[in-house]
Image (cartoon, rainbow, N blue to C red):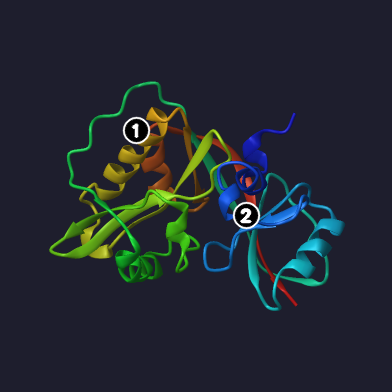
Amino acid sequence: MEHLLDNPIWNALISGNSNLAHGNSQVKCYAENVAPFVGFEDYSTANFNILYKLVTNQRVLAVVSAEEITIPNNWKVLNNMKILQLVFDDPIPQEPVNQELVTLTDQHIPAMLALTKMTNPGPFSERTIDFGNYNGIFNNGELAAMAGYRTQPSPYIEISAVCTHPDHLGKGYAGTLINYHIRQIVAASGIPYLHSRIDNANAIRLYQKLGFSIRKEMTFNIIQKN
């Protein structure tokens, strides 16, 4: 039986993120200003053709799969990379968060966009905040670090957009934010998980230190409608 996290986007869009889903019973995606991710019930050519009719010309989309998949010729592959999927499985209770965290709202979107543009933690758009539960750490009035939720294939919840301003590296901000979200997710009977670029050794070490284990290597395709 296929694991929920082998097809995380589809399973999120039919469960925890169903309120953000656009599409039909075979293909679903998020609004363009929320996230580029698209989910398929299966990765068939027929479903890619359904997607082609659903989205606007030149739209860029992200496809996450457990294995390499064939992208039909009417799509341009902009990038193909491997990412690691990690799941929290540490039974040891996390330490309470001592750093003051600020709930991020629409008024913080310009600062969030600026920080993610500078640090490139992954796709982040004007309404990515709609995934919910974004928190930040401010230093002298500047957004120094942030993290929040993204895909939610229930009961799993992805911690995402983990980033720290270059001027504030080494202060433990990322660990503080992740630790906070772990506690919140586990308290709600969820299971935290996240993704990392396979070459981001520093991030992977941090995630493992905080109780995450590598579950699987995933394929990440960035495609564009021709």
The foreground one among 112 and 164 is 112
Residue displayed at 67% across by 43% down: 7
Q: CA distance from mark 2 to mark 1?
A: 27 Å
Q: Which residue is mark 2?
A: 21
The percent position of residue 154, horizontal first and vertical second, equals 56, 36
Dot 1 falls on a residue whose secondary structure is: helix
- The tag on residue 191 is none
Q: Amino acid at mark 1?
A: Arg
Residue displayed at 30% across by 68% down: 111
Label whose residue precedes the other's in the sequence (2 or 1): 2
Q: Which residue is mark 1?
A: 183
The percent position of residue 223, horizontal first and vertical second, equals 68, 67
Q: Nearer the viewer, mark 2 or mark 1?
A: 2
Residue displayed at 41% across by 36% down: 208
Q: Is residue 209 above or below residue 36?
A: above
The percent position of residue 59, horizontal first and vertical second, equals 65, 73
Q: Is residue 6 left or right of residue 19?
A: right
The percent position of residue 172, horizontal first and vertical second, equals 24, 46
Q: Is residue 156 above or below residue 123?
A: above
